[in-house]
Amino acid sequence: MTIHPHSSANSYFIYCVGQCPIKISAFKSAMVQSNICAKPLLGRYQGQDEQSFISSLKNLETIAPWLVAEESILLIHDFDSRDRPKATLKYLASGEEHYVGKMVAVSRSVALRQANFTYDITYKNYFVCQSEDSSIQQPITFRSQRSKVVG
């Protein structure tokens, strides 16, 4: 019997630093100067398209000052043998965490029908969070400073 290790023992987080082009540019420059990988992503949050980033969770403390206007980040962790990580929403003010399911790759057409998705620009892959007990794409409920509940 062969046991295959999980593809990644690392944990990551997906986050936004706002949508102001000047702030995004300053953030990118600061990450380069700090030698921190902040891979750009595109996504949809609460039906609004926006630029986001993914970084190693070990860099959260350094990136945290850029997140002051954000209410939550999406933790990506515990990859299974099929390369599907768990996704947990972490509220920054309270530290409260809410498990939202597995992050799974979907087609462009499926992603574009969702209120929330992530698009990896480099590999041209779309991802959504999916409840583990369902094969149907489930929307994620987010709390945002733009509105109290997002669905």
Image (spheres, rainbow, N blue to C red):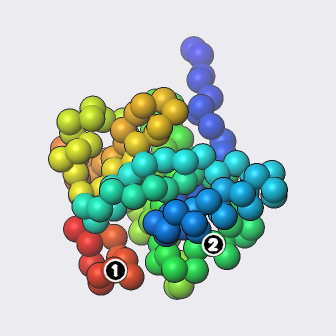
Q: Is residue 120 above or below residue 115?
A: above
- Going by the picture, which residue comes out furthest to the top? 1
Which quadrant of the rendered structure holds the N terminus? Answer: top right
Q: Position of residue 143 (x, y in %)?
A: 35, 76
Query: Pointers 2 and 1 in contact (CB under 8 A)?
Result: no
- C-alpha distance separating marks 2 and 1: 17 Å
Q: Position of residue 116 (x, y in %)?
A: 30, 56
Q: Is residue 135 above or below residue 98?
A: above
Q: Could you tell me which residue is drawn at 38 percent across and 52 percent down?
A: 43
Identify residue for label 2. 66
Q: Could you tell me which residue is drawn at 52 percent across and 33 percent down?
A: 122
Q: Position of residue 52 (x, y in %)?
A: 49, 56
Name the residue nearer the viewer: 84 or 109: 109
Which quadrant of the rendered structure holds the C terminus? Answer: bottom left
Name the residue nearer the viewer: 14 or 30: 30
**Badge 1: how crowded within 10 Å, few (<14), some, or many (20+)?**
few
Q: Can the viewer see residue 135? A: no
Q: Tell me the amino acid under the disc marked 2.
A: Trp
In what element is the residue under mark 1? loop
Q: Can the viewer see residue 10? A: yes
Q: Is residue 109 left or right of residue 70?
A: left
Identify residue for label 1. 146
Q: Is residue 98 above or below residue 111?
A: below
In what element is the residue under mark 2? helix
Q: Tell me the amino acid under the disc marked 1.
A: Arg
Q: Quadrant of residue 127?
A: top left
Q: Is residue 60 left or right of residue 108?
A: right
Q: Position of residue 74 (x, y in %)?
A: 48, 61
Q: Could you tell me which residue is drawn at 47 percent across and 77 percent down?
A: 71
